Amino acid sequence: MTKRKNPNELLSPRYRLSKEETDMLYDMYLSEMSILDISKETNIGSYAITKAFEKYGYKIRTKKEAYEVARKQGKIGGSRGKLDKANNWKGGRIIDTHGYIHLKIPDHPRATANGYVREHLVIWEEHHKKELPKGWHIHHINGNKSDNRPENLLALSSRKHSLIIPELSKRIGELEQELLEIKNELKQYKK
């Protein structure tokens, strides 16, 4: 059995990495080092490392997997991994630009790369004690995207969900017209 060399001694000219060099770097990667960390330790560019991994068929982490490794190491997520101590930490509950509430649940099967899941999905699944079928959507009956009471959530197939939207738009238009008429009557009454 041959003794492995230190990766710092393996710098190839022009950063063309041999199979042996790539094997050593990949061992570092498997020990949950990031490609950037390996690059800093070995003075080999991260691009060269990535290309060598691809060339020799080594699997590179997905964004979600990389995020999870970094979170475990405390590199991300507030105060060195202690989210509850971060100044801007709001308990893992955020509202997106569309008005949906998201919860920080990194282990959820439908969590995004940064570990968030839409609250209405979590509540619907907990209430019905089953996963939402693939291709289905949760519809907010009253139209309020932050009202995630179980009685306000309705699971619909994509097809049914797309059919209900025009009906809702029509009804909203009718209600807006009624509201306008009521406001006009109130103005007349006040005079």
Image (spheres, rainbow, N blue to C red):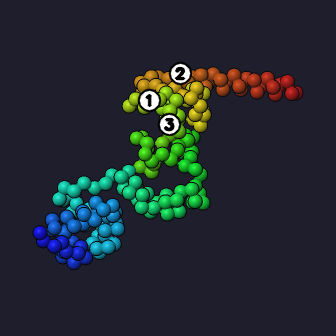
Question: Residue at coordinates 42% horizontally, 58% vertically from top-left?
Answer: 72
Q: Position of residue 95 (x, y in %)?
A: 57, 45
In this rendering, the count of numbered labels is: 3
Question: Residue at coordinates 45% horizontally, 51% vertically from top-left?
Answer: 114
Three-letter code, disc 3: Val
| Towards the viewer: 5 or 65 | 5
Task: Return the residue at label 1.
Answer: 130
| Towards the viewer: 185 or 152 | 152
Question: Residue at coordinates 11% horizontally, 69% vertically from top-left?
Answer: 1
Q: Disc 2 versus disc 1: distance between alpha carbons? A: 28 Å
Q: Measured along the vertical axis of the image, is residue 125 above or below residue 27?
A: above
Q: Quadrant of residue 182?
A: top right
Three-letter code, disc 2: Glu
Q: In this rendering, which labeled residue sits more in front, label 2 or label 3?
A: 3
Q: Position of residue 108 (x, y in %)?
A: 43, 42
Q: Which tag, 2 or 3, sits closer to the chain's start?
A: 3
Q: Quadrant of residue 87?
A: bottom right
Q: Assign a secondary structure to mark 1.
A: loop
Q: Are marks 3 and 1 in contact (CB under 8 Å)?
A: no
Q: Assign a secondary structure to mark 2.
A: helix
Residue 132 lies left or right of residue 169; in this view the side is left
Task: Return the residue at label 2.
Answer: 167
Q: Measured along the vertical axis of the image, is residue 85 above or below residue 163?
A: below
Question: Residue at coordinates 35% horizontally, 68% vertically from top-left?
Answer: 37
**Looking at the rendering, in which quadrant would you find the C terminus?**
top right
